Image (cartoon, helix red, strand yellow):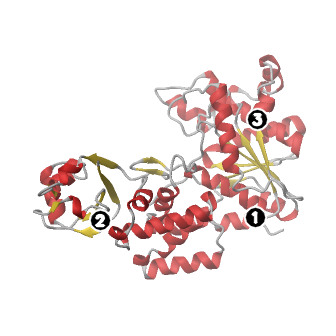
């Protein structure tokens, strides 16, 4: 069993950890858990580092437990939040838990004879506690002063929103989770993002007080991007792991568009590639950044991991069609499949009869430019493509015969922003 601690350290995934954890990893099989918040029916790319941490843990011979917080989800974790979350109904949470379980199964092996993963809903015990019993058996071990020192609480107290008693109690519930897992499965490690450190150490303290045993915690840095934008967010919204919310093509494109300054870090965080492979890609990024080879490998690895080989193949093919092929030779159904998640506008076919419609007018009409004057400047500068071919003539007009199969135009602004015009 190799030392997982060294692996996580090389990948930049240790922000803080309890003393002695490296030795524990090197000498014993560790059972560890991470919690997932069921506030939506799908996880998003911000959850990927957490998923990968459990998968790495299992690959190094340890035992992973994923808690889907059906109990704590009724309360909501205040960590990193400026205001209280909207509370979901039990039915909504149960439906979300079921969906998340399916996504976790792509990353973890639940059939291993030696270190099978587990998915557990903490409602199994939290929902059965009575208030007086919980206050007596758990609450009495935490002073108010102790709770006020936790960052998740202190930050909210400093805000105008404040913190409700409901969220104030969240830390106690998560600490109880750790005790339950310690008792039931011998779990001695909790992992998570650095904003979870206060919750994790509370659980460690509770195990020490109730069981007189030592438990451990490990947290990784919170995700940031070199450009300062929030990781996992795009102009069109959150990037989800559920293909019904974010298509594999759009998912692939998200990773393909990674900034050169972030790509090596993401390769370490989100793939299983080894040191030599990542070092080689880092070298190519430095010597020939225009090839974007590291981004292609990143997009390929993560898309295959989340969606599988066949959706990856379709996404790569579609990506090639975006820039490298003459799409006018394709069938209209294939074009529609490639651009299924691209914004579209329907226009009457007779708009393109006779002399058709001016390109400048069309660009403004579908709002690829905010005004007709800006559309004109965009065309003149060579920033507009029609069916993958640059058109810089401001007098250009589009007629139906130029549409793909007489039914579709693919407009593109710059290198990334596509818009489909459907003739009806």
The quadrant holding residue 95 is top right
Q: Is residue 323 above or below residue 110?
A: below
Mark 3 vs mark 2: which is more N-terminal? Answer: 3
Identify the residue under disc 3: 122
Q: Nearer the viewer, residue 209 or 217?
A: 217
Q: Position of residue 80 (x, y in %)?
A: 55, 40
Q: Position of residue 230 (x, y in %)?
A: 46, 50
Q: Which label sits in the foreground, 3 or 1?
A: 3
> Image check: 263 left or right of 148?
left
Q: Tell me the residue at 66%/43% (across/down).
A: 100
Q: Position of residue 280 (x, y in %)?
A: 56, 80
From mark 3 to mark 2, how far is it between C-alphas?
52 Å
Q: Nearer the viewer, residue 150 or 319?
A: 319
From mark 3 to mark 1, how far is it between C-alphas?
27 Å
> Image check: 114 left or right of 132?
right
Q: Tell me the residue at 49%/76% (across/down).
A: 293
Q: Quadrant of the N terminus?
A: bottom right
The quadrant holding residue 208 is top right
Which secondary structure lies at badge 1?
A: helix
Q: Which label sits in the foreground, 1 or 2?
A: 2
Which secondary structure lies at badge 3?
A: loop
Q: Position of residue 111 (x, y in %)?
A: 84, 55
Q: Are marks 1 and 2 in contact (CB under 8 Å)?
A: no
Identify the residue under disc 1: 4
Identify the residue under disc 2: 387
């Amino acid at each position: 069993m190799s030392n997982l601690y060294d692996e996580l350290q090389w990948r930049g995934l240790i922000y803080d950890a309890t003393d002695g954890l490296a030795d524990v990893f090197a000498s014993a099989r560790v059972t560890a858990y991470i919690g997932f918040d069921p506030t939506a029916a799908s996880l998003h790319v911000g959850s990927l580092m957490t998923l990968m941490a459990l998968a790495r843990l299992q690959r190094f011979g340890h035992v992973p437990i994923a808690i889907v917080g059906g109990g704590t989800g009724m309360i909501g974790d205040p960590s990193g939040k400026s205001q209280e979350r909207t509370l979901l109904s039990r039915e909504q949470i149960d439906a979300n838990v079921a969906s998340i379980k399916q996504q976790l199964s792509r990353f973890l092996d639940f059939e291993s004879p030696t270190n099978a993963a587990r998915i557990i809903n903490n409602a199994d015990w939290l929902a059965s506690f009575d208030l007086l019993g919980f206050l007596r058996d758990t609450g009495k071990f935490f002073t108010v002063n102790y709770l006020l020192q936790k960052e998740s609480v202190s930050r909210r107290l400093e805000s105008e929103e404040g913190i409700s008693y409901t969220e104030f109690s969240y830390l106690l519930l998560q600490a109880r989770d750790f005790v339950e897992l310690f008792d039931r499965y011998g779990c001695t490690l909790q992992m998570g993002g650095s904003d979870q450190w206060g919750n994790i150490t509370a659980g460690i303290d509770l195990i020490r007080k109730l069981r007189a045993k030592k438990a451990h915690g490990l947290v990784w840095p919170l995700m940031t991007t070199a450009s300062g934008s929030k990781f996992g967010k795009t102009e069109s919204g959150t990037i989800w792991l559920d293909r019904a919310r974010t298509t594999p093509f759009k998912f692939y494109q998200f990773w393909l568009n990674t900034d050169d300054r972030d790509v090596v870090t993401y390769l370490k965080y989100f793939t299983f590639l080894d040191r030599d492979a990542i070092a080689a890609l880092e070298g190519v990024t430095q010597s020939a950044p225009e090839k974007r080879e590291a981004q292609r490998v990143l997009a390929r690895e993560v898309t295959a991991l989340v969606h599988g080989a066949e959706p990856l193949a379709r996404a790569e093919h579609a990506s090639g069609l975006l820039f490298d092929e003459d799409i006018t030779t394709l069938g209209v159904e294939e074009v529609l499949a490639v651009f299924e998640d691209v914004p579209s506008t329907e226009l009457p076919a007779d708009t393109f009869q006779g002399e058709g419609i001016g390109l400048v007018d069309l660009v403004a009409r579908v709002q690829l430019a905010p005004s007709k004057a800006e559309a004109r400047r965009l065309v003149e500068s060579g920033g507009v493509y029609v069916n993958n071919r640059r058109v810089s003539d401001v007098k250009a007009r589009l007629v139906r015969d130029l549409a793909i199969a007489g039914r579709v135009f693919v407009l593109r602004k710059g290198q990334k922003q596509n818009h489909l015009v459907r003739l009806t």
